[in-house]
Image (tube, rainbow, N blue to C red):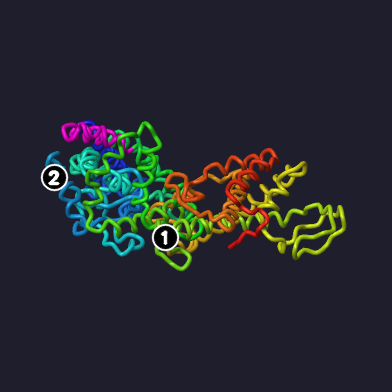
């Protein structure tokens, strides 16, 4: 704590030094004016010129200092996008945190909020310029902000659903302990100064009229950077030391759960939520889904054995009065942050329940990709070796290369024919290029839509002070895209002709169910077709499942 306070004083000394520099010309002007008025300096000649020059410089310095001060004070520091948790919606959670603060002998947080991420922290929202936030969130009231109030406790929503009550209390102990240092007036003043400078730099960026203000703010921020970092490290160390005596054994268990929660949450977002977001659907119970994902991860991972026995204990989400409503709000915010989706549900941005996910997302995803593959194949001319055409196609002379008409039925047999054999390598390369280009165009369109209207203001992609974190995944390679699209075509054929069904794997996302069981061996046969031009493994797989490759696939 002593280290943190010393560094805070260093930050405040930089603020005082900046003020002194701004007042120096004014002090010099006062000395000259006083000297002339008292007769100590001659009134005329060079002294008169110096008086006017220094007075002008003083006025200019004061004007510039006032401009910098106004921008720093009035600029709104960035707030973390969160879902507020009013006390009436979670009295048990507030009671738990207040009891924890009492045990730690620190002030309780002024309010609580959830973040759709695996992290927890304290956030000061008492900056003088902090007015109403941009965009009311999901109809839930915001935490009240008042000058001098304790910081807001932000809790990762996956923790609240996966952790047990005792584990959550142990996890939050060092975080809540941070309200003690936050109450120190020197630390609070230093933090407000640094946040104001950071906000001023953001406001001045790209505005020529505020170039001087931005330059001064950046200079001061650079001067404060090391001291501010050391101050925060000192605060964290003091909070951790204060929390040592509270649930120490449980804290070790809770930290293990943090790693597990992060792994399951990451896979749920990337492999389950992202496919839905890309087609205008957002899973409305992501936090409930993370419990299923982590339970499945615990079952598969030998290192996590025994963790599922915890599920018999009371989950921390029971501390909420309406966990479903909070989960839905956090799920929508996650879609905004990680994908850039709109702030509210609409005709093209609909919530989807887990029970509807296979039909609404998995099946639709497969058919969209199968349609894209069919279009790409239609753009690549194929050699015709016989005058007998497929149904609906016009006859062509033997040996003449003609483009495949889109009237040709989309079948797995056609994909097998084009991707196997000696000429398959060239077709694969062309398909990869076409699919990559089309997916890139669609992604650019989605991002443009997010920047123009997803957040309510054209050209302003910010969410309550922070930019969205999309894209969640790096772009897929052409080979990965082609593999996904061929797999989608086969899955559609299996659903249409073999009685298979779309399903959901909590860790791997879309899954094909045959006879109620997941068939995870399809990918290997598709890779053999694409990488080696060998379609025999896939033909054998189709025969085992009962898929009729010659039958047309229903597309979207």
Q: Is residue 70 left or right of residue 98?
A: right
Q: Which residues are magenta?
A: 233-258
Q: Is residue 350 left or right of residue 239?
A: right
The residue positioned 60% from the left and 61% from the top of the image is: 555
Q: Position of residue 490 (x, y in %)?
A: 60, 51
Can residue 268 be seen here? The reply is: yes
Q: Main secondary structure of the magenta part?
A: helix
How dense is the environment of label 1, judged by Cα within 10 Å: few (below 14), some, or many (20 and up)?
A: some
Q: Earlier in the sequence, mark 2 or mark 1?
A: 2
State the CA–CA distance, disc 2 to disc 1.
38 Å
The residue positioned 57% from the left and 54% from the top of the image is: 498
Q: Look at the image and say whether residue 212 sits in the magenta stretch.
A: no
Kindly identify which residue carries mark 1.
352
Quadrant of the rendering where the N terminus is positioned: top left
The residue positioned 29% from the left and 34% from the top of the image is: 233
Q: Secondary structure at mark 2?
A: helix
Asked whether 338 or 508 is in front, the reply is: 508
Asked whether 230 or 499 is in front, the reply is: 499
Q: Position of residue 344 (x, y in %)?
A: 40, 64
Name the quadrant containing residue 384.
Answer: bottom right
Which label belongs to residue 99? 2
Q: Secondary structure at mark 1?
A: strand
Can residue 24 be seen here? The reply is: no
Asked whether 24 or 466 is in front, the reply is: 466
Q: Position of residue 164 (x, y in %)?
A: 24, 43
């Amino acid at each position: 704590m002593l280290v943190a306070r010393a560094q805070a004083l260093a930050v405040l000394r930089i603020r005082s030094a900046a003020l002194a520099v701004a007042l120096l010309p004014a002090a010099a002007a006062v000395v000259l004016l006083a000297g002339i008025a008292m007769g100590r300096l001659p009134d005329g000649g060079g002294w008169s010129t110096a008086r006017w020059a220094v007075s002008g410089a003083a006025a200019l310095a004061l004007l510039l200092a006032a401009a910098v001060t106004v921008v720093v004070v009035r600029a709104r520091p960035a707030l973390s996008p969160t879902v507020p948790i009013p006390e009436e919606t979670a009295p048990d959670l507030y009671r738990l945190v207040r009891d924890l603060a009492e045990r730690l002998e620190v002030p309780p947080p002024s309010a609580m909020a959830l973040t759709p991420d695996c992290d927890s922290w304290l956030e000061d929202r008492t900056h003088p310029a902090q007015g109403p936030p941009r965009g009311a969130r999901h109809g839930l009231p915001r935490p009240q902000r008042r000058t001098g109030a304790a910081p807001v406790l932000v809790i990762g929503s996956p923790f609240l659903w996966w952790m047990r009550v005792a584990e959550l209390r142990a996890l939050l102990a060092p975080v809540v302990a941070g309200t003690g240092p936050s109450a120190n007036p020197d630390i609070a003043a230093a933090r407000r100064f640094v946040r104001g400078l950071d906000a001023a730099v953001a406001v001045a960026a790209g505005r020529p009229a505020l170039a001087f203000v931005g330059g001064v703010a950046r200079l001061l921020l650079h001067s404060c950077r090391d001291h501010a970092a050391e101050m925060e490290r000192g605060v964290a160390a003091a909070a951790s030391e204060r929390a040592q005596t509270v649930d120490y054994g449980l804290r070790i268990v809770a930290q293990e759960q943090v790693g597990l929660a992060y792994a399951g949450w990451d896979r749920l977002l990337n492999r389950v939520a992202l496919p839905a977001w890309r087609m205008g659907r957002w899973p409305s119970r992501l936090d409930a889904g993370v419990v299923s994902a982590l339970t499945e991860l615990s079952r598969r991972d030998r290192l996590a054995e025994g963790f599922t026995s915890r599920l018999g204990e009371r989950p921390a989400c029971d501390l909420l009065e309406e966990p479903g409503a909070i989960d839905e709000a956090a799920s929508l915010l996650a879609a905004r942050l990680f994908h850039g989706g709109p702030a509210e549900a609409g005709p093209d941005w609909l919530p989807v329940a887990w029970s509807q996910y296979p039909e609404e997302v998995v099946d639709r995803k497969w058919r969209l990709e199968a349609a894209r593959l069919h279009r790409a194949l239609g753009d690549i001319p194929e050699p015709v070796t016989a005058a007998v055409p497929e149904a609906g196609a016009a006859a062509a002379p033997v040996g003449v290369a003609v483009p495949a008409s889109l009237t040709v039925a989309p079948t797995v047999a056609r994909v097998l024919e084009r991707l196997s054999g000696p000429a398959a390598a060239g077709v694969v390369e062309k398909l990869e290029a076409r699919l990559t280009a089309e997916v890139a165009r669609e992604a650019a369109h989605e991002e443009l839509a997010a920047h123009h209207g997803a957040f309510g203001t054209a050209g302003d992609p910010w969410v309550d002070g922070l930019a969205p974190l999309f894209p969640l995944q790096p772009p897929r390679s052409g080979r990965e895209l082609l593999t996904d699209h061929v797999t989608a075509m086969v899955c559609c054929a299996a659903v249409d002709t073999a009685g298979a069904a779309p399903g959901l794997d909590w860790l791997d996302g879309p899954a094909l169910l045959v006879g109620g069981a997941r068939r995870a061996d399809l990918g290997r046969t598709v890779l053999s077709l694409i990488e080696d031009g060998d379609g025999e493994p896939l033909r054998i797989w189709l025969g085992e499942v009962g898929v009729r490759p010659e039958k047309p696939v229903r597309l979207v």
